[in-house]
Image (spheres, rainbow, N blue to C red):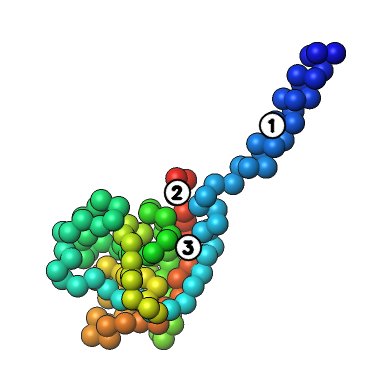
Amino acid sequence: MKSVIIHLAFATMIGILSGCSSTPGDKWQGYTDKGQASYYANKHQNRKTASGERYQHQLKTAAHREIPFGSEVKVTNLENGKAVVVRINDRGPFIRGRIIDLSKSAFKSIGKTSEGLLDVKIEVIKVPLRD
């Protein structure tokens, strides 16, 4: 009888734990938003980002206030339909209406830097296993 109780307890525990199998990043998978995108000024070149990496204009990276570091985000210019995939490695932007700060090369691939800001849609397409 004692072994039956132990087996039932073990089975119950497995059932409970399997219900908790989602990872924190799951809530971000497929997340979308619309707003404005800006880009990093030249003065940020080689400065450390919030993730500890150094910012490089030529890399397709971006800053978002909450999306986990390492996530891949598709950014689409709503005016011309051009899109770029960036990796989140910094925090920001902290200006109302702006939802993402793009590296200069990422911004240039979907719009002109002379525009300063772009109306965009963002979509999280890949979240790293860690959050």
Q: Earlier in the sequence, mark 1 or mark 2?
A: 1
Mark 3 neighbour density, 10 Å: few (under 14) some (14–19) many (20 or more)? many
Q: Nearer the viewer, residue 56 or 35?
A: 35
Q: Is residue 104 left or right of residue 46?
A: right
| Between discs 1 and 3, the one toward the N terminus | 1
The residue tagged 2 is: 131
Amino acid residing under circle 3? Val
* Residue to which mark 1 is pinned: 14
Residue 33 percent across, percent down from the top left:
49, 73
| Inter-mark Cα distance, 1 to 2 | 24 Å
Describe the element under mark 1 as helix, strand or loop: helix
SS class of the residue under badge 3? Answer: strand
Q: Amino acid at mark 2?
A: Asp
Crowding at dot 1, Cα within 10 Å, few <14 / some 14-19 / many 20+, comes out as few
Q: Amino acid at mark 1?
A: Ile
Residue 83 in view, yes or no? no
Front label number (2 vs 3): 2
Quadrant of the snapshot with the N terminus: top right
Please, is residue 74 above or below residue 114 in the view? above
Of callouts 2 and 3, the N-terminal one: 3
